Image: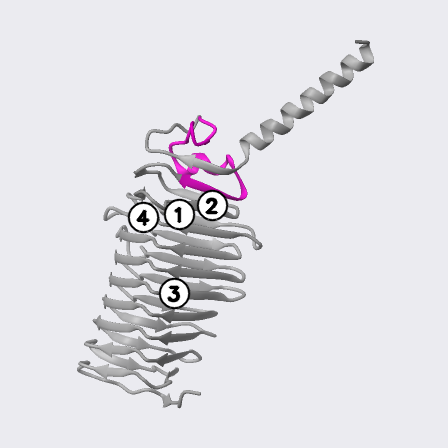
Amino acid sequence: MNKSSAFRFIFTTLLVVGFSAVAFGQATRTWVSGVGNDANPCSRTAPCKTFAGAISKTATGGEISVLDPGGFGAVTIGKGITINGTGTLAGILNSLGVNGIVVNAPATDTVIIREISINGAGTGANGIRYLAGKTLMVDHCWIYGQNNAATSRGIDVALGANGTLKVINSVIENVTEDGIHLNATAGLAVAVIDNSTIMNCGQDGVEAAANVRGDLTRSIVAVAGANGVSASGANTQFNIDDTTIAHCTTTGLRSSAGDSIRVSDSMIANNNTGINPNGGAIDSFQGNSLMGNPTPGSFSSTTNKQ
């Protein structure tokens, strides 16, 4: 082999090794295990120990899967990714004022959190904090024990641009403040909450503050220290269907000036006050049951179903 051929061979080999290293460092699917090690490449046979350890080795749009039961640590997510705990007990313990998951992704990226248990152990901050990203889906998750301070929430949405939260088949309970808190300082925070239970919250079950478009369907909001569902800021519209709002210390449904809540086929029961438009609007689209509230309140209007 002449020098020129030898040079080309070495150069090509180095390129292949380099590309392999990049691909190896940013795999589409990575794995974590309770007996893993973050020094590992996060492959199935050499898994990492924590979600944080696996993030840097997972490509944008990729997925971190959980091999066996374990606690995999709090994590900040800065890109589109899926964390999937399906088939095992995949836990995050976020005690001592720590957020369980922080999502701060690019405006075009989607983050999916599936079948993860997030336990604040009585001293956690927020179970999930959503700061940026196109979409955050929370699917079949359990969030509880977020009791560090007055601002501890199950899910805290604090967007500065358009974003969408999807919560399906999940349970949020035992938090100091709101079960789900929604707010956008610019753009719109869109929230779709379906087939979920939110209970034992120190403040509101769901608080939709400024610039929110929300939907709550087939769900239960119960045992809240303040309101079941509250529209509390400007430019907010919230739709509720086939949902129970019960046992809230202040009000089942509470709106405010410039906001509207629309309700159909739902039960508002055993709250101190059932409905309080509070300068805004709470409109019935029929099929609702208002019962067992010492102060029932009344809907702002009733509209026939179309």
Labels 4 and 1 touching (C-beta < 8 A): yes
Q: Residue at x 34, y 65 (%)?
A: 195
Mark in the foreground, 3 or 2: 3
Query: Which of 161/77 is in front?
Result: 77
Q: Which mark is residue 186?
A: none
In percent of width and height, residue 300 lies at 36, 88
Amino acid type assigned to the residue bearing label 2 in the image: Ile
**Residue that mark 3 sits on:** 193
Query: Which of 276/7 is in front?
Result: 7
**Residue that mark 2 sits on:** 77
Question: Helix, strand, or loop for circle 2?
Answer: strand
Calculate the distance from the C-alpha at mark 4 to the C-alpha at mark 2: 15 Å
Calculate the distance from the C-alpha at mark 3 to the C-alpha at mark 4: 18 Å
N-term-proximal mark, 4 vs 1: 1
Amino acid type assigned to the residue bearing label 1 in the image: Ile
- Circle 2 crowding by C-alpha within 10 Å: few under 14, some 14–19, many from 20: many
Question: Helix, strand, or loop for circle 1?
Answer: strand
**Residue 250, located in which quarter of the rendered image?**
bottom left
Q: Residue at x 42, y 72 (%)?
A: 233
- Circle 4 crowding by C-alpha within 10 Å: few under 14, some 14–19, many from 20: many
Note whether residue 56 is visible: yes
In the displayed structure, 61 sits above or below 287; it is above
Query: Which of 235/28 is in front?
Result: 28
**Residue that mark 1 sits on:** 101
N-term-proximal mark, 3 vs 4: 4
Q: State which region is magenta.
A: 40-65
Q: Residue at x 37, y 70 (%)?
A: 216
**Residue that mark 4 sits on:** 118
Note whether residue 175 is visible: no
In percent of width and height, residue 225 lies at 23, 66
Q: Is residue 47 magenta?
A: yes
